């Protein structure tokens, strides 16, 4: 530990006692004892320094000990993008990283500066952090987004369901008021069938993907695309050997009438830290 | 505090809210009518009259939305209400997420 502190002196700006309220912005942790720099790719062009402990290293930059805040959404977006850029660079350099959330800042204490606090935390949590990194080694996160076109699916269901076809025939022969009420019944029945189909498909897809990947997280479906509705949004932790079987299964789903699939990745394992 | 209101936007917003509420009430009435039709508690003539009345109400609401240019305003109110209900349902179904623990 003493030796690594000496090595750190080369990379850490000495902090004067009057600057004890300086902090350290933390991007991510990696399984490496390599100290150094990732160059000036940090938030607001800050130099990203790599602080190394026993066999873990952390990508950081020096900053005031207060969170980054702005009412300008564009500014906040640029900070978040810079955070991801650093995590991505670290991931490409060391293969496995534990990303920290945007705005994770360690501040100094009266008796020790932010760097000392960071190193103390790294030492205290060493086994836990190393265990998490070893569990993630070689794996990447992929987002699986399954969309369907409700109109296409509704047509397929209407054509294949005998009760719905019978109701459609009945409606044609009814007077206007009766036909209106029958159409409501038809729509309610169709909606019920489609919802049952969506539930069954989601459960089947979840089951098949769960068998193919290391770990997964079910996210809220969002971001409908035109008339396509997002049915399934799953974050998956995938090893290189698991990728092809996953792609084959998603290709099968994509071939089902009215369905389409988006596979987003690879990216650092944000959802699995 | 000075509140800067555009009179046209205000009228559009209030009318949108009123029409959105009318639509929700109409849908409730329609579901109730459908239930009664399916359980056989309505005579054929009653079903016919109810169907015609609801059809005319549909047409009247669409006409108002078109003439007053409030279709988007009405949809925004409906989407807002749907979102609020969804948030409540999500909170009930996933209380652990509220506390920041994995569900």
Image: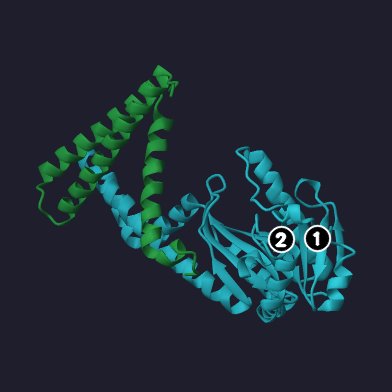
Chain colours: A cyan, B green
Residue at image position (54%, 59%) is A257
**Image quadrant for the N terminus of chain A?**
bottom right
Secondary structure category for the residue under label 2:
strand
Query: Which residue appears at 69% of the width and 65% of the height?
Result: A111
| Few, some or many residues within 10 Å of mark 2 (<14, 14–19, 20+) | many
Side (left or right) of A110 relative to A203: right
Identify the residue at image location x=15%, y=38%.
B49
Between A140 and B38, the one nearer to me in the picture: A140
Kindly tell me whether residue A182 is visible in this rendering: yes
Whether residue A255 is visible here, answered yes or no, is no
Q: Quadrant of residue A20?
A: bottom right
The answer to which image quadrant residue B56 occupies is top left
First of labels 1, 2 by sequence position: 2
Foreground of the two, A89 or A26? A26
Discs 1 and 2 carry the same chain letter: yes
Q: Residue tagged by mark 1?
A: A89
- To which quarter of the image does residue B46 belong? top left
Front in this rendered view, residue A120 or A112 = A112
The correct choice, above or below, for A255 with respect to A32 in the image is: above
Q: Which residue is mark 2?
A: A26
Alpha-carbon span between mark 1 and mark 2? 14 Å
Mark 1 Cα-neighbour bin, 10 Å: few <14, some 14–19, many ≥20: some
Q: Residue at x 79, y 57 (%)?
A: A15
Q: Nearer the viewer, mark 1 or mark 2?
A: 2
Q: Position of residue A119 (x, y in %)?
A: 74, 71
Q: Are marks 1 and 2 in contact (CB under 8 Å)?
A: no
- Assign a secondary structure to mark 1: helix
């Amino acid at each position: 530990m003493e030796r690594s502190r000496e090595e750190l002196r080369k990379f850490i700006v000495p902090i004067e006692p009057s600057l004890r309220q300086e902090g350290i912005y933390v991007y991510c942790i990696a399984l490496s004892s390599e100290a150094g720099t990732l160059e000036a790719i940090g938030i607001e062009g800050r130099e990203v320094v790599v602080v190394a402990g026993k066999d873990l290293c952390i990508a950081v930059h020096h900053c005031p000990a207060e969170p980054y805040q702005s009412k300008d959404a564009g500014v906040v977006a640029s900070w978040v993008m810079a955070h991801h850029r650093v995590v991505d660079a670290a991931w490409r350099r060391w293969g496995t990283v534990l990303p920290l959330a945007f705005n994770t800042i360690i501040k100094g204490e009266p008796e020790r500066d932010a760097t000392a606090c960071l190193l103390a935390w790294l030492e205290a949590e060493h086994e836990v952090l190393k265990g998490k990194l070893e569990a993630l080694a070689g794996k990447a996160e992929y987002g699986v987004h399954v969309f369907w076109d409700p109109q296409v699916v509704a047509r397929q269901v209407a054509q294949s369901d005998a009760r719905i076809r019978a109701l459609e025939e009945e409606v044609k022969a009814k007077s206007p008021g009766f036909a209106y009420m029958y159409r409501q019944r038809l729509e309610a029945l169709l909606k019920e069938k489609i919802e049952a189909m969506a539930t069954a498909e989601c459960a089947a897809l979840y089951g098949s993907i769960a068998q193919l990947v290391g770990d997964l997280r079910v996210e809220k479906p969002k971001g409908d695309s035109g008339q396509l509705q997002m049915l399934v949004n799953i974050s998956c932790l995938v090893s290189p050997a698991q990728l092809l079987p996953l792609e084959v299964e998603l290709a099968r789903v994509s071939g089902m009438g009215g369905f389409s699939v988006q596979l987003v990745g690879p990216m650092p394992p944000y959802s699995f830290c | 505090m000075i509140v800067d209101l555009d009179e046209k936007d205000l009228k559009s917003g209030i009318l949108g809210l009123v029409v959105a509420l009318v639509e929700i009430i109409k849908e409730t009435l329609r579901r109730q009518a459908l239930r009664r039709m399916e359980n056989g508690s309505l005579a054929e003539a009653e079903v016919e009259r109810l169907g015609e009345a609801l059809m005319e109400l549909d047409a009247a609401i669409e006409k108002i939305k078109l003439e007053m240019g409030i279709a988007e305003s009405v949809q925004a109110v409906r989407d807002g209400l749907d979102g609020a209900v969804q948030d409540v349902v999500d909170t009930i179904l996933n209380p652990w997420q509220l506390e920041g623990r994995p569900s």
